[in-house]
Image (cartoon, grey):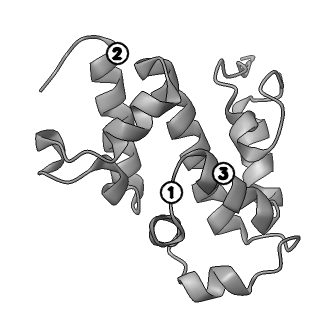
Amino acid sequence: MAIYITQASSTPFFGLLGGTKTAKSSSDFDIIKLARQGFPKKTLLALAKKISLNIQELSSILHISERTLQRYEDDAIIKTEYAEKAVELARLYTRGEEVFGSMDKFKTWVKTPAHIFNGEAPVTILDTSAGFDMVFKELGRIEHGIFA
């Protein structure tokens, strides 16, 4: 018999999605639940504002046209696939803030072209899951002092 225990994440990214930063409910299953439930468009736009993304950058990352995004009512629950990407953005930016020591430093880094990303800014590759993986891995390297 095996017992599996899920460990709560030490990353309180819920604050970027309108929750409290001290929320203890950030296990992997809670992340899944949040993405499945979705959240209102106004929460998505508040996230974009907090992480300094304009509507064009946000719509590119979410794979939704700007016009479609604008058509949503503020209180309308966005589709699961968009909510999932928004959760990933919140997790990434929270991780970046941990690594860089400040959100402002991370926001500058994420919009600065880098050799490791073929001369592109990290934010431009976040439209794919592979791009998110690459940025998360680079943050791990930076945290451990391994620069490419």
Q: Residue at x 33, y 32 (%)?
A: 137
> Quadrant where the N terminus lies?
top right
SS class, disc 2: helix
Residue occupied by mark 2: 143
10 Å crowding of disc 3: few (<14), some (14-19), many (20+): many
Q: Which amino acid does label 2 sit on?
A: Glu
| Distance in Å between CA atoms under marks 3 and 1 | 8 Å
Q: Which of marks 3 and 1 is nearer the N terminus?
A: 3
Q: Which amino acid does label 3 sit on?
A: Leu
- Residue 116 quadrant: top left
SS class, disc 1: loop
Q: Earlier in the sequence, mark 2 or mark 1?
A: 1
Residue occupied by mark 3: 47
| Distance in Å between CA atoms under marks 2 and 3 | 24 Å
Residue 118, position as x, y percentages in the image: 12, 51
Residue 40, position as x, y percentages in the image: 82, 64
Residue 43 vs residue 6, the one in the foreground? 43
| In the image, residue 65 above or below residue 101 | below
Residue 60, position as x, y percentages in the image: 45, 71
Q: Nearest to the eye among marks 2 and 3: give it.
A: 3
**Mark carried by residue 53:** 1
> Quadrant where the C terminus lies?
top left
| In the image, residue 72 above or below residue 78 | below
